[in-house]
Image (cartoon, rainbow, N blue to C red):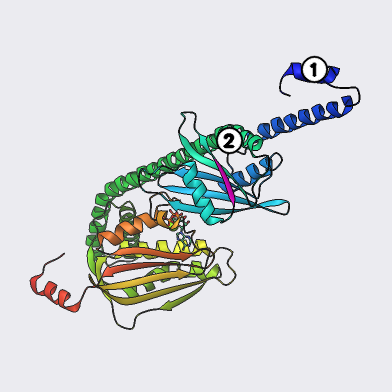
C-alpha cells in the first residue's frame, strides 16, 4: 500500500472489481488518515515545552502516543550520572498521573533496553514491556521510552516499528530539553557569581573606607577626651560631650562594617549557648513574632559553654532562624522550637542547639544539596543560597557539625553541635594564660 503505483492501481480498479471499488477506496482513505495522524503526532512531539519538568514531559508524550498506539503505562527514563529516573505515566480520567522511580547505578554502569525491561517487569509483574533507547545526536543513549501492556499487545510488528520511529523524534526533543536545563543552570550560577562578586567588592570597599576613617576618628576621640578633662565651662563642656558621643557611635559603626566584611580577626572566647540564643532572639525575635510565628525555647538547665567567635556563632543561629521564618511563610500555625542540650558522642561531648520549624520542609532530593554554596529554592532577589554553606563552614571551623533533617510538608530540624568547653579547660587557660 506504500507505493504510489499500488495505490493508483487500486483507485483505477485495475486490481479490483467494480464491486469492491468503494471498499478499497475507503481502505486507502483510512490508511491516509492514519498516516496523517501519525505525522500530526510526530509534529506535536517536536513541540514539547522546553522548560517543562520531566513529569510534564512524560505525561505529554503519553498523551500524544496514546493517539497512535494502545498501551496501559508509558515511561520516560533518563540516565543522569549515576542515577536512573523513570517517569511512569498512567491515565487518570482526562489526565495522566506520573510516578517517579529512581535507582542508583554503579559508577560506569550502562543501562541496556533489556535491563530496563527487567526493571519494569519487577515493578509491574505480568506486564509486557517494550523499551526503545533515545539516542543523542552523537549516537549516545541518554534515556529510553517504554510501553507497558497488561495483555500481550496485538499487531505488535507495526506498532513496534512506529514506536521506534517515534523514539527518534522524541530523542531530539528530550535532548533539547536537557540542553536547555543545562544552559539555564549555567546562566543562573553565573548570575549568582556576579552577584556575590559584587557583594564581595562592596564589602572590600566598605572595609577600605572603614580603615581610612578609623585613624582620624581615633585622633578625634583622643583629643576630645583631653579637652573634656580641661573644660569646665558650659555650654562648651556639653558640646564636647556630644562630639565624644557621636565619635563613639561612628567608631561602633566602623567596627560593624569591618566585622561584616570579615576583615576583622575573630576573637575566640568562652560563650554560653543559652546566652547566644537569647542575644539573637533579642535581635530578631520581634521580627519573627510580628509575622505570627510562635517561638518556643527549650533551653538546657545547666550552663553549656563552647569556645568560639560570638559573632560567627550568632550568625549561624540568625541564618537558621531566618530560613525557618521563610519556610513558615503561609503555614497555618507557624512555630519555631529552639532547643539547647548536651550530647555525648563517641568523639566526645558536644553542646547542641537545634532549630525546628513546622513549615514547608525540604524535598528528599534537595536535602543533600542545601549546604552547597548558591543552592537556593528562593527567588533570586530573596536568597543567595549562601546562608547554610557559610554556617556549615563556621561550624566546621569550630570543630563542630551542622546537620539537617526534614520531611516535606511537615518539618525541618537543623542541629548545630560544637565541642563543649569545660570548667577544667577554662581553669587551665587561666593558669597558663594560653589562648587557643
Ligand atoms: N528551615 C527550612 N525549611 C525548608 N527549607 C529550608 C530550610 N532551611 C533551608 N532550606 C532550603 O535550603 C536552601 C538553602 O538555604 P540557604 O540558607 O543556604 O540559602 P537561602 O536561604 O536560599 O538564601 P540566603 O540564606 O542567602 O538568603 C533554601 O533555599 C531552602 O530551599
Ligand atoms: Mg538562608
The foreground one among 416 and 16 is 16
Residue range in magenta is 127-131
Residue at horizontal 66 percent and vertical 47 percent from the top: 71
Local secondary structure at mark 1: helix
Can residue 25 be seen in the rendering of this structure? yes
Tell me residue 223's x, y (percent): 23, 57
Mark 1 = which residue? 8
Most extreme residue toward the left, as rendered?
432
- Where is residue 35, by image quadrant? top right
Local secondary structure at mark 2: helix
Q: Which mark is residue 220?
A: none
224 left or right, relative to 81: left
Q: Which mark is residue 167?
A: 2
Residue at horizontal 38 percent and vertical 50 percent from the top: 373
Q: Looking at the figure, which quarter contains the N terminus?
A: top right
Other-residue count near label 2 (Cα within 10 Å), few / some / many at <14 / 14–19 / ≥20:
many
Q: Main secondary structure of the magenta part?
A: strand
Q: Quadrant of ligand 1?
A: bottom left
Please tell me whether mark 2 or mark 1 is closer to you in this view.
Answer: 1
Amino acid at each position: 500500500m506504500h507505493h504510489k503505483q499500488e495505490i493508483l492501481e487500486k483507485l483505477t480498479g485495475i486490481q479490483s472489481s467494480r464491486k469492491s471499488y468503494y471498499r478499497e477506496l475507503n481502505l486507502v482513505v483510512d490508511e491516509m488518515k492514519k498516516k496523517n495522524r501519525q505525522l500530526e503526532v510526530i509534529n506535536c512531539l517536536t513541540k514539547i515545552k522546553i522548560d517543562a519538568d520531566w513529569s510534564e514531559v512524560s505525561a505529554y508524550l503519553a498523551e500524544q502516543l496514546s493517539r497512535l498506539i494502545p498501551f496501559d503505562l508509558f515511561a520516560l527514563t533518563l540516565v543522569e550520572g549515576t542515577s536512573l529516573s523513570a517517569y511512569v505515566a498512567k491515565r487518570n480520567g482526562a489526565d495522566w498521573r506520573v510516578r517517579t522511580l529512581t535507582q542508583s547505578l554503579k559508577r560506569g554502569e550502562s543501562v541496556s533496553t533489556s535491563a530496563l525491561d527487567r526493571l519494569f517487569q519487577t515493578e509491574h509483574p505480568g506486564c509486557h514491556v517494550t523499551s526503545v533507547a533515545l539516542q543523542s545526536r552523537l549516537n549516545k543513549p541518554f534515556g529510553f521510552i517504554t510501553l507497558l501492556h497488561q495483555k500481550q499487545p496485538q499487531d505488535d510488528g507495526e506498532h513496534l516499528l512506529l514506536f521506534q520511529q517515534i523514539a527518534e523524534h522524541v530523542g531530539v526533543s528530550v535532548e533539547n530539553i536537557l540542553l536547555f536545563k543545562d544552559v539555564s543552570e549555567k546562566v543562573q550560577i553565573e548570575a549568582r557569581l556576579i552577584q556575590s562578586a559584587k557583594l564581595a567588592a562592596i564589602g572590600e570597599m566598605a572595609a577600605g573606607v572603614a580603615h581610612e576613617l578609623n585613624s582620624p576618628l581615633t585622633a578625634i576621640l583622643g583629643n576630645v577626651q583631653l579637652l573634656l578633662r580641661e573644660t569646665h565651662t558650659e555650654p562648651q563642656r556639653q558640646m564636647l560631650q556630644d562630639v565624644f558621643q557621636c565619635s563613639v557611635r561612628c567608631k561602633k559603626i566602623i567596627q560593624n562594617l569591618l566585622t561584616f566584611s570579615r576583615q576583622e580577626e575573630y576573637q575566640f572566647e568562652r560563650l554560653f549557648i543559652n546566652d547566644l540564643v537569647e542575644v539573637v532572639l533579642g535581635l530578631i525575635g520581634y521580627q519573627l513574632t510580628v509575622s505570627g510565628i510562635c517561638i518556643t525555647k527549650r533551653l538546657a538547665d545547666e550552663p553549656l559553654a563552647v569556645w568560639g567567635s560570638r559573632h560567627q556563632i550568632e550568625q549561624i543561629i540568625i541564618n537558621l532562624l531566618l530560613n525557618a521564618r521563610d519556610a513558615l511563610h503561609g503555614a497555618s500555625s507557624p512555630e519555631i522550637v529552639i532547643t539547647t542540650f548536651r550530647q555525648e558522642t563517641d568523639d566526645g561531648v558536644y553542646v547542641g542547639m537545634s532549630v525546628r520549624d513546622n513549615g514547608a520542609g525540604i524535598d528528599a532530593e534537595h536535602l543533600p544539596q542545601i549546604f552547597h554554596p548558591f543552592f537556593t529554592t528562593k527567588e533570586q532577589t530573596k536568597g543567595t543560597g549562601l546562608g547554610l554553606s557559610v554556617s556549615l563552614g563556621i561550624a566546621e571551623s569550630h570543630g563542630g557539625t551542622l546537620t539537617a533533617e526534614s520531611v516535606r510538608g511537615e518539618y525541618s530540624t537543623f542541629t548545630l553541635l560544637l565541642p563543649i568547653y569545660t570548667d577544667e579547660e577554662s581553669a587551665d587557660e587561666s593558669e597558663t594564660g594560653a589562648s587557643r
